[in-house]
Amino acid sequence: MGQAQTSPPGVGNAEELAESLELAKAAPSSFPEILDAVTASILNIWEGFLGHIPFFVASLLILVVTWLMAKVIGRFVFRFAKRTGRRPSLQHLLVRLAKIVIWVIGVTFSAMVLFPGLTPAKALGGLGLLSVAVGLAFKDVFENFFAGILILWNFPFEAGDVIKCENVQGRVERVDVRNTAIRRTTGELVIVPNLFLFKNPVEILTNRNKRRFTIIVGVGYGVDLLEAVKVIEQAVASCKSVRDDEPIQIFPHAFADSSIEIEVTWWAGSTPLDERKSQGEVVSAVKRALDKAGMEIPFPYRSLTFSQPLALRGDQASDGGAAQ
């Protein structure tokens, strides 16, 4: 068997030194030579750019075709969603998702044409790494984005509905994929993150065209309750804002300090304006009816009890006290 030959110590260093000397000799030593080398490098870059122009043009053409396809497919999806009776916000969501898919495919193909060494596997891997990095950097944004998609897909409220969530109540002006714009009855516009609506209970006040309202009416202890209930029921039924397709319910409710409380419930329109108008009309009608029937709506009474006889100021005094 042959034995491996090893170079004597110092031979490798000598060879590297010799190569360095050869490179130093080959390097330009004068200004004209340096200028020629720089010019040659620039020409090589320019030739490479000119050779890459067809790929650049083809990449731009792919982006233009992608833009046209996104518009055409977006219109097709919108018409299809409209024919199937989808909600307007859901129609726009489907159009947006379709355009996003088309643009992702188009940009991927454009990048593969612009950079010939880029393969589909590398492109998908790069997109995966990019999505992870962006997802970590914009966690809240993506949470609101996906919550918005779920809201648009599943939730039964739409632009124009009146909703209440925690301390936010108002009319929905628009539902986007990231947030929802709600106009309060006092005029302020509140931008609510979709994640907030997704995680908390939402009351849809206008889910139906009617709602039930309740007020408490107090009558004196000396009033006949059956007669009072009859008078109040007639007064509520006479109001135009009260729906006649739902029952009016009136029940004595509790013993209060100065009155017996009667619970009055009825149905009216579901909007905040309907609520205020109907309550105002019902309260006014009940007050007029009770006044006309001579039934008291008492103020708070307070009875004073003295443990010792109290002397009265004047000519008369109680039996246990002296006149003052």
Image: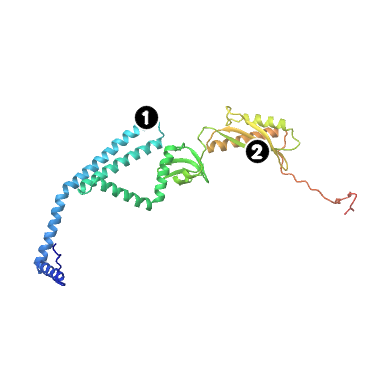
Q: Residues within 10 Å of mark 2 (few under 14, many from 20)?
A: some
Which quarter of the figure is the N terminus placed in? bottom left
Query: How many labels sit on residues?
Result: 2
Circle nearer the viewer, 2 or 1: 1
Label drawn at residue 83: 1
Q: Amino acid at mark 1?
A: Arg
Q: Is residue 278 above or below residue 23?
A: above
Q: Secondary structure at mark 1?
A: helix
Q: Nearer the viewer, residue 270 or 293?
A: 270
Where is residue 172? Give x, y as percent.
Answer: 46, 40
Q: Residue at x 23, y 45 (%)?
A: 110
Where is residue 56? Give x, y as percent.
Answer: 19, 47
Q: Amino acid at mark 2?
A: Ile
Instruction: Using the rendered view, name the quadrant where residue 92 is placed.
Output: top left
Which residue carries the number 2 mark?
Answer: 216
Q: Which residue is at the far bottom? A: 10
